Structures are given as structure tokens and as C-alpha cells.
Image (cartoon, rainbow, N blue to C red):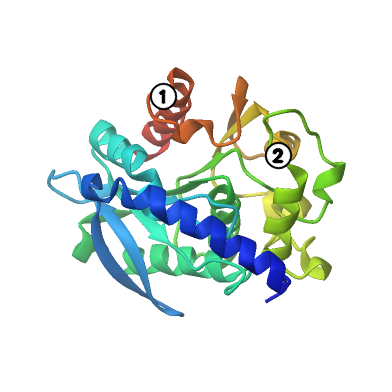
Amino acid sequence: MFCSDAVYEQVLAIRKANRKRLEEKLLDVQGEEAYIPTRAGETRVLIYAPGSEGPVPVYFDVHGGGFIMGHPEDDDEFCQRVCETLGVMVIGIDYRLAPEYPCPSDKEDVYDVIQYVHDNAAQFGIDPERMAVGGHSAGANISSVVAKWAKETGDFTLRCQILDYPPMDIQTNPYQKFFTEGAIPPQVADMFNDCYIDRAHAGDSDCSPIFCSDEELMGQCPAVVLTCEIDSLRDEGEEYALRLMKAGVEVTAKRFQGVPHGFTMHEGDPAALEGQLMMIDGLRRYLL
């Protein structure tokens, strides 16, 4: 592990609190648990099936949590909304977490799940030509790299990538980024970064997509990018969207005013619903 013992103790405490919140909603989770073969063994997923005759499009959802915590159950209500609204299958991926499994373990898990589902499309009842990936916060970072890898390898084709308040620059010191009250505290962001990767490699494009070359950006699938005003990550997310546009990628982007990082998962908040509908509209445009 890259982080110190003291930082690791903080991680364990954060996970414990996150798990407690999760246990309060476990009985209401609507996704069906399954395990998919990957290079690491098996990766746990939650599958939301639309109930309609296949083959149907599929959206792979990647939860957030600063790369160190989180579960696909955290996105349960959003995944169910996507499934019911669009009639597509949604698969939430429980990727490995740092610091025990640093970058790019998480991205390998997500990539391998998508490839397995693609290669076994009949088993899952999905259309392998209509697939999309997306995520929230750390999950958006993961999704962007998976989209890049898919373009580079040609193993499968993605119709679009959903990047919801993405952290795209793990190299720059969080204390040097934009900050306002209500944004992610720089000391917290610094802890996440310390856990995720050796700082000597934090500028690699597979970790910090903002440093992708023009060639790596060209030819990627269309992107839907959401950023929020009260977020230290907003500038790098918006810069990445602009770089994709300049590389010829179709991009739909919006900054949501007056809301903090993580706002789209705050069920019951009108702004959250607006953000979710933007993502759903993007999936409708590219998958249906």
C-alpha cells in the first residue's frame, strides 16, 4: 500500500461508517446479485433487468467513493430509475478498492466485466452493440479510462460514457485546486490520492485522464459530462470535456449551479433529479 498506517486507519473508519449507512437500505435494494469472471477471479455485480424481451441495451454503472469505499448498492435508486425509464439492463459493478488494490485494479475489474458480458451477450439477454458505461465521482474517472481502453483495444464498442462530477487530475496537489465552503476538503482529497497510486505515476493518463494525449482522446465514444459549482473537481471535469470536444468527440456538458459534489445521488432533491434526467437523456440518445 502507498498510504501510511495512520491514513489506512482513517480509510477503515470511513468504510465502517459507509457500511452502516448501506445496511440501513439493504432490504430495499432491487438489483440481483451475481458474480462475473475477471482476471482477479470473480467480480460482484448487481443486475437490474427490465423484464422485456431481449436483446436489450445495457448500461454499466460505476459507483463513487474516492476509490477507497463504496458499493453498487449506493446507486441502487438511480440504477433502478435508468432501468425502468429506458427499458435497458443496468449492471452495477463492485470493483476492488484502494489502498489494498491500487490503480488500475478498479479499472481492470470494470473492463473485464464489460468484456465478459459483451462476449456472453446471449446469456445476459443484451445487445452487445448497444452498451454504455458511466459513473459518479471516482466511478466517472474509472469509466473514462475504460472508454479509452475500449477504443484502443477494439475488444468491444461503447455507445457513450457518462461522467458525473469526475476527478480527472490525481496528480495536482488538492491544496492548489479551486476550493469553496462545501467542496471536498483538500485534506480529504489528498488522503484519497495517497491511497490510490504512487505519486510518481499519478500523472499517467490511466490514472489522470486530463493528461491524455490528443491521440488518446480522438475516436472515443460520445460523453455526457456533469460538473457542479461547489466542487473542487469542477474545473478539471470541464477542461476534460473541452479537450474531448477539441479532439472531435461529441460531448454534452453542463455545470449545475449551487450544488456540491455528489449531488446527483441525493434522492428527493430536485437538483438530483435534474442531474439524473440529464444522464438518462444521454443514455436514451445513444442506446435506444
Q: State the image coordinates of residue 246 (x, y, percent, origin top left).
A: 74, 37
Q: Nearer the viewer, residue 3 or 259?
A: 3
Could you tell me the amino acid type at mark 2?
A: Leu
Between the C-alphas of marks 1 and 2, the distance is: 21 Å
Residue 249, quarter of picture = top right
Q: Is residue 67 left or right of residue 279?
A: right
Give the residue displayed 48% in from the left and 65% down from the top: 111
Is residue 276 placed above or below 148 in the rendered structure? above
Q: Which mark is residue 117?
A: none
Residue 47 visible at all: yes
Give the residue displayed 48% in from the left and 53% down from the top: 17
The local secondary structure at tag 2 comes to loop
Q: Which mark is residue 273?
A: 1
Q: Nearer the viewer, residue 268 or 104?
A: 268
Residue 256 visible at all: no
The local secondary structure at tag 1 comes to helix
Could you tell me the amino acid type at mark 1?
A: Leu
Q: State the image coordinates of residue 1 (x, y, percent, origin top left).
A: 67, 76
Q: Is residue 118 left or right of residue 150?
A: left
Give the residue displayed 57% in from the left and 73% down from the top: 101
Dot 2 crowding, Cα within 10 Å, few <14, some 14–19, many 20+: many
Q: Specify the quadrant that holds the C terminus.
A: top left
Q: Is residue 191 left or right of residue 20?
A: right
Q: How many marks?
A: 2
Do the residues under discs 1 and 2 have CB atoms within 8 angstroms? no
Q: State the image coordinates of residue 77 (x, y, percent, origin top left).
A: 32, 38
Give the residue displayed 40% in from the left and 66% down from the top: 113
Q: State the image coordinates of residue 255 (x, y, percent, origin top left).
A: 63, 24
Dot 1 crowding, Cα within 10 Å, few <14, some 14–19, many 20+: some
Q: Is residue 141 left or right of residue 45?
A: right
Which residue is under mark 2? 233
First reached walking from the N terminus: tag 1 or tag 2: 2
